[in-house]
Image (cartoon, coloured by chain):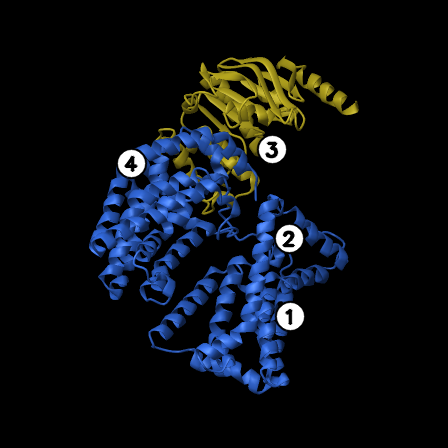
Amino acid sequence: MVKQFINLEWKSFICSASFKTNLILKILMFVGAFFAILYFLALGVFAYYIIEEKIKVNPLKVINRGLIFYLLADLVMRYFLQKMPILNIKPLLYLPLTKNQVVSFGINKTMISFFNVVHAFFFIPFSIVLIFEGHPFINVLGWHLAILGLFYCNNFINIFVNNKDAVFYSVAIILIALGASIYYNVFDITIYSAPIFQEFYDTPYLSIITLVFAFILYKMAFRYFRKNFYLDAGLAKKVAIAETDNMIWLDRFGSVSTFLKNDIRLIKRNKRSKTTVLMSVIFIFYGLLFFTGSIEAYDGPFWRIFAGIFVSGGFLFSFGQFVPSWDSAYYPLMMSQNIRYREYLESKWFLMVIATIVTTILASFYLYFGWQAYAAVVVGAIYNLGVNSHIVLWGGAYIKTPIDLTSNKKAFGDKKAFNVKTLLLTIPKLLLPMVIYALGHFLHGEVLGFLLVAIFGLLGFLFKNKVFQIIEKIYKSEKYKTLAAYKEKN
Amino acid sequence: MIITSNLSKKYNNNLVLNIDHLDIPKGQSFGLVGNNGAGKTTYFSLLLDLIQPTTGHIKNNNVLVHESEDWKPFTSAFIDESFLIGYLTAEEYFYFIGELRGQNKADVDKLVSQFQDFFHGEILGQKKYLRDLSKGNQKKAGIVAALIGNPEVIILDEPFANLDPTTQIRLKGIIKNLAETKGITVLISSHDLLHVTDVCERIVVLEKGEIVKDLRTSAETLKELEAHFSGEAVQ
């Protein structure tokens, strides 16, 4: 029986679309995975020595302090990326298998998932180093098992909270709030959490608690699925209650409003697009890495522009690069209607403009880091609006990846979206403004640098018509290829 | 109205459609039947310029379909769920199509209100997005959306599939009415021989991409079609 299940899994793995991509990509992916593992391994082995040398504190204490964040972040990652076991279970329902077998197969499968295994590459070598460095074996073992238990708790918690957005957002907010309050010395959760983790080391037999807890959660998950193992219960698709909003206030924008209304609904009502919005909010904080001087490599003055462009352009990049793929699910409809491409594009452009302006206003807290920081954001926004918004739409016209609006799969990048054309387009998007700024900066000073970038951005507006014409032409000439590509699901 | 000449479509040297000549006059209700893979959907996709012909062309009201887009304002279609926007409610979807076809809200409301019977209270005011409706109800919404904006040509791929018996009968009434009283050219495909013979004045049988029968519907047509398809099954 188990053999059959494993066989099924193996087939679904080999037959998945991602497996069929070309050989070079496969090799690249393999090399990438290999290095990721190597990196984790090295981190596990050397973390001890690095911490000891740099901070001169007991490395175990340092790890214990950070562990609470590691665990919370793990939960968030899982929420986004870990697939749930119930998904592929439906066809097994009417086969002559006991329900217990099917349910436990589904849940056991999550236990050997990448999200659990990857941590082993860090924690196992780290624990071994601990023992080598003279920590008593029993204590290290206790600590290690306790953490193992905690990761499995996360695993089962994630099964429960899957698809419950409210839970996810509260965890994410707690994570950010805790991080921020430590940074600003308001409240340090680690003072309370670190001793707990330390306790597992000091009294190793306590680790049984987390293991038992994980086991209880496993049983609960099992019981939950077993009880709801019906098409109209746990396996049912969630049906959202539709809210209608005629958005009459948009009518003032004239003919663009037809598409604008639709695009706003698209963003509001689909999981994938909501994730994009969330990501652009995270991008607002990206600049903190640069302006707080926390990363030495980013101290060069032209990096400010780099940061400014990302802070104000999070939505612009993550949404714009997938125009027209957002409409892939009903592209045949669009193509058989009398679509005015210009208005179609205008609507997407308009959305990006609104989002960029809003983020620029939200990002005004960068004034705290000096006027230069906020000037970089504002100038970056102008460049984004004038130049990048057009380039992003242009690049999107070449990307023919269908988007499944209802799932987050591939929300974090897709290898198909990574072709030479889009790569070339990053030059004007990012490098050019940095070069322009550097020119002004070293010729005269930062003011000239900012001014030059802003002027370039304003000049970009002049080319809007031209670029839209080009994009329209691409849409038309690539129409059949795009239609065919969108038809291939996954 | 619709003139097809020398039309063929090949996928990797596999000929899936090959129509020498087919002329569908204005106001005709035209039915396309054939087994799976006969080329029905391929033909409709070519009519809507969703795929490119390998040879030949289709002229819709004297517009070359694969060269100009001027056929779009007077042609509408419902082929499959890729013609629905899943995250909209039925009303929002109708208004969207209406706006694309130059109809204001009142126009759309007026048209849609004629189909209360057809909807059977399961489409309008449902607080559900189209993606959450059943297959049959999705189809109802898609078919009615194809009637918005006074099209002169309406293309429906398998309109009867997934519909309940009551709705099938109502749909037959709607389609007949379109061709007979409004002079609209209606093209439908179906696997249900009884329905097509009820609704269509003319029925064309496709087999492996070729036209093998072109019948003007009469009392004997259903018998003839049944004989044709059962004969094929025996071979």
* Residue at mark 1 to residue at mark 2: CA–CA distance: 21 Å
Q: Position of residue B35 (x, y in %)?
A: 67, 26
Task: Mark 1 vs mark 2: give the one in front.
Answer: 2
> SS of the residue at dot 1?
helix
The outermost residue toward the front is: A443
* Residue at mark 3 to residue at mark 2: CA–CA distance: 27 Å
Residue occupying the point 32% across, 51% down: A434
Q: Is residue A304 visible?
A: yes
Instruction: Tell me the amino acid under the disc marked 4.
Output: Phe
- Chain letter of the residue beneath label 4 in the structure image: A
Instruction: Tell me the amino acid under the disc marked 1.
Output: Lys
Q: Position of residue A377 (x, y in %)?
A: 28, 55
* Residue at mark 3 to residue at mark 4: CA–CA distance: 50 Å
Which disc, if any, is residue B161?
3
Quickly name the residue at label 2.
A88
Q: Residues within 10 Å of mark 4 (few under 14, many from 20)?
A: some
Display colour for chain B:
yellow
- Chain letter of the residue beneath label 1 in the structure image: A
Quickly name the residue at label 1.
A219
Q: Are marks 1 and 3 in contact (CB under 8 Å)?
A: no
Quickly name the residue at label 4.
A463
